[in-house]
Amino acid sequence: TQSTRPQRLLNAVQKNATRGDPRSVVKAIDDFCRHKEWAMNVGDEKGCILDSVVSEINPAAVLELGTYCGYSTVRIARLLPPHAKLITLEFNPDFAAIARQVIAWAGLEEKVQLVEGASGDWIPKMKEQFGITTFDLVFLDHWKDRYLPDTKLMEECGLLRKGSVLLADNVICPGTPDYLEYIRSSPRYESRYFKSHLEYTKVEDGLEKSVFKG
Ligand SMILES: O=C(NCCCCCn1ccc2cnccc21)c1cc(-c2ccc(F)cc2)cc(O)c1O
Ligand SMILES: [Mg+2]
C-alpha cells in the first residue's frame, strides 16, 4: 500500500533524529519539509516565535488545537517546566497515530496528552476530563473557521483566566479573518501580530498573540 506523507515524515524522524532528543526531531522534520515534501507544520521561522512565547509564559497548562504530526507539540513540550501538561487535540486518527510516534521518539510522552476528536466536542469537557482549571497558553492551529467559535467556547467554559495567552497560526495564510476581526476589536484581549512566512515558503503569514484580560 502507498505510504502517506505523515508516514514518510515519521520515517524521516526515525531515520535522522536521535531518540530522546527533541531538537533533533524538530530539525529532522524541518529538513524533510524543506528539502523533500512540504507539510503544514508551523515550521522553523514561526516556530522560533512560538518558542519565545512559550519561554516567556513558562506555562503549567497548555492546549494545542491541531496536532497534525506533532511538530509544534514537540516544540512546545520540550520547553515546558517539570509537571507542566500539554493537551493536544487531533481530529484525524491517522495524523494522531503518527503524532504519538513522533512525540514518543522525542521522549516527551510524559508531558503530552494527545486527545482524538473535535474541538467543539472536547472543549466543554476539558475541566471534568483532565482536571484543568484554566489554560495558560492555547495554540490554535486547527480548522481556520473554528478559531473564532472555539475561542468564544473557551471563554464560555471558563477555560481562560486574566493573562491567558492565545497564539494563533495562519492568521494570513490560509487566513482567519473573522477571528482576527473579533480578537483585535474586543476590549477583552490585547493582541499583537508577529509577521512571518508560511512554513518553508516566502509567502506571508504570521502568528497573532492575544492576552485575555478577564
Ligand atoms: O489547515 C491547516 N491546518 C488544519 C488542518 C486540519 C485540522 C483538523 N483538526 C485538528 C484538530 C481539530 C479539532 N477540532 C476540529 C478540527 C481539528 C493548515 C493549512 C495550511 C496551508 C495549506 C495549504 C496551503 F496552500 C497553505 C497553507 C498551513 C497551516 O499551517 C495549517 O495549519
Ligand atoms: Mg498551521
Image (tube, rainbow, N blue to C red):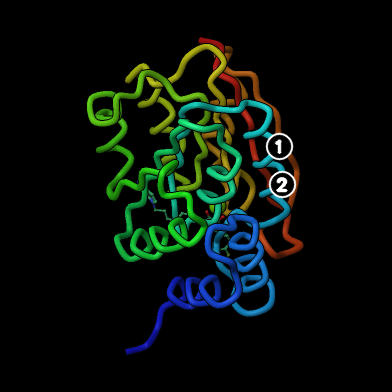
Q: Is residue 75 left or right of residue 115?
A: right
Counting from the top left corner in percent of width and height, residue 174 is at: 57, 54
In the displayed structure, 11 sits above or below 58; it is: below
- Residue 52 is labelled as 1
Identify the mark at residue 72; answer none if there is no mark.
none
Circle 1 sits in a helix, a strand or a loop, which is it? Answer: helix
The local crowd at label 1, few if under 14, some if 14 to 19, many if 20 or more residues have their Cα within 10 Å, is few
Q: Which residue shows up at 74% across the image and 48% down it? A: 196
Q: Is residue 76 left or right of residue 2?
A: right
Identify the residue at horizontal 53%, vertical 64% (top origin).
19
Is 123 situated above or below 189? below
Please tell me which residue lies in front, 33 or 142.
33
As drawn, the residue found furthest toward the bottom would be 1
Q: Which residue is mark 2?
A: 48
**Distance between mark 2 and mark 1 Cα atoms:** 6 Å
For image coordinates 58% across by 12% down, the residue present is 187
Figure quadrant of residue 197: bottom right
Left or right of 35, for residue 161: left
Q: Does residue 186 sit above or below 52 in this rendering?
A: above
Q: Position of residue 21 (x, y in %)?
A: 59, 58
In percent of width and height, residue 27 lies at 66, 63
